[in-house]
Every structure is written in C-alpha cells, then in structure tokens.
C-alpha cells in the first residue's frame, strides 16, 4: 500500500482510539471532534487510494463529493452532520451557538463514535487495505 495512504490511516486510527478513550469519561466534545477527524482522514485515504489528491479541507461534505464511494451512500446524511462538530467542539466561544442543541450530549458522542467506526471499517474493507493497528476499536 502507498505510504501516504498508510499515514492517513494511521492518523485516523489514532483519532478513533482517542474518541474511544474519551467516551469512557464522557468527554463528549473530544469524542465528537476525534470521530469527525477519523472520518475526514479515512475519506482522504480513500481518495488517495483512487489515485487522486484530496483537497486541503476539513469539510466532510466536500470530501464525499470528491470520492466515488457507493459504500458510504447509506451514511450520507449522518456524515454531513459530522461537519457540525469540527469547530464548535474545539473552541469554547463557539458553544452553544453553532450546534443546534448546545454542546454534544453523550448520545451525540456515542452516535459520532459509531459512525466513525463504520466509516473506518468500511474503508478498510472496500479499499482492500489492512487496518493500521492491531488494536481493534471497542464498542461503547
């Protein structure tokens, strides 16, 4: 596998692992942020696997538009909502203004983590790539 793709997957795996650690202590902002980051990085790895350079963006919708990924079609609406977590979960002066219902709840965090796992696992399967780490994501 291309070394650049491997690096994107490695970073995505780390974001997934951090989200899993944060959910144990109900640090919902960090779960949502790292879940968003995992998804973003896996989409960039998938674009690279298709032989193209991903845009320099953090916007999942843009990356989805650049990616031929029928294996993610059923997750489209959920993936679009992940963009809500990029800025508001990072900076206290944006909360609760940018999120419709205030800071992410535990239910939001669990949903975001579940979605990140789905994207990670599907990308690994669909792109015929090996998961970067032997550490398998745990269910929360």
Image (cartoon, helix red, strand yellow):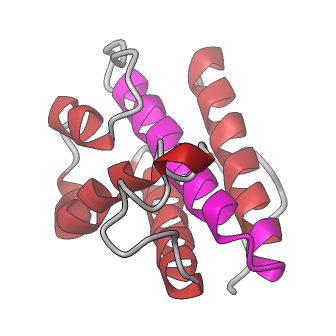
In front here: 37 or 129? 37
What residue is rendered at 78% in x and 57% in y?
A: 18
Image quarter for residue 20? bottom right
In the drawing, does residue 133 fall left or right of residue 112? right
**In the image, residue 27 lies in the stretch drawn in magenta:** yes
* Residue 13 screen position, x and y as percent: 70, 48
Residue 2 in sight in this render: no
**In the image, residue 84 lies in the stretch drawn in magenta:** no
What residue is rendered at 49% in x and 42% in y?
A: 42
In front here: 95 or 49? 95
In front here: 116 or 134? 116
Image quarter for residue 59? top left
Residue 34 in sight in this render: yes
Q: In this view, does 131 lie above or below 7?
A: below
Q: Main secondary structure of the magenta part?
A: helix
- Quadrant (top left/top right/bottom left/bottom right) for the C terminus: bottom right
Q: What stretch is highlighted in magenta?
A: 22-49
In front here: 28 or 35? 28
* Residue 14 screen position, x and y as percent: 75, 46
* Residue 122 screen position, x and y as percent: 43, 60
Image quarter for residue 58? top left
What residue is rendered at 30% in x and 68% in y?
A: 100
- Quadrant (top left/top right/bottom left/bottom right) for the N terminus: top right
Count of marks placed on residues: 0
Q: Is residue 28 above or below residue 62?
A: below
In the drawing, does residue 6 fall left or right of residue 45? right
* Residue 30 screen position, x and y as percent: 68, 58
What residue is rendered at 56% in x and 70% in y?
A: 113
In the drawing, does residue 99 fall left or right of residue 116? left
């Amino acid at each position: 596998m291309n070394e650049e793709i491997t690096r994107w997957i490695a970073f995505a795996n780390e974001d997934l692992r951090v989200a899993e650690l944060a959910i144990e202590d109900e640090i919902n902002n960090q779960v949502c942020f790292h879940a968003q980051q995992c998804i973003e990085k896996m989409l960039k790895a998938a674009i690279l696997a298709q032989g193209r350079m991903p845009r320099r963006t953090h916007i999942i919708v843009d990356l989805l538009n650049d990616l031929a990924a029928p294996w993610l079609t059923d997750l489209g609406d959920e993936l679009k909502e992940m963009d809500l977590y990029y800025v508001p979960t990072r900076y206290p002066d944006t909360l609760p203004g940018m999120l419709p219902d205030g800071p992410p709840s535990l239910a939001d965090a669990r949903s975001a983590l579940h979605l990140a796992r789905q994207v990670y696992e599907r990308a690994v399967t669909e792109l015929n790539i090996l998961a970067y780490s032997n550490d398998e994501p745990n269910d929360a």
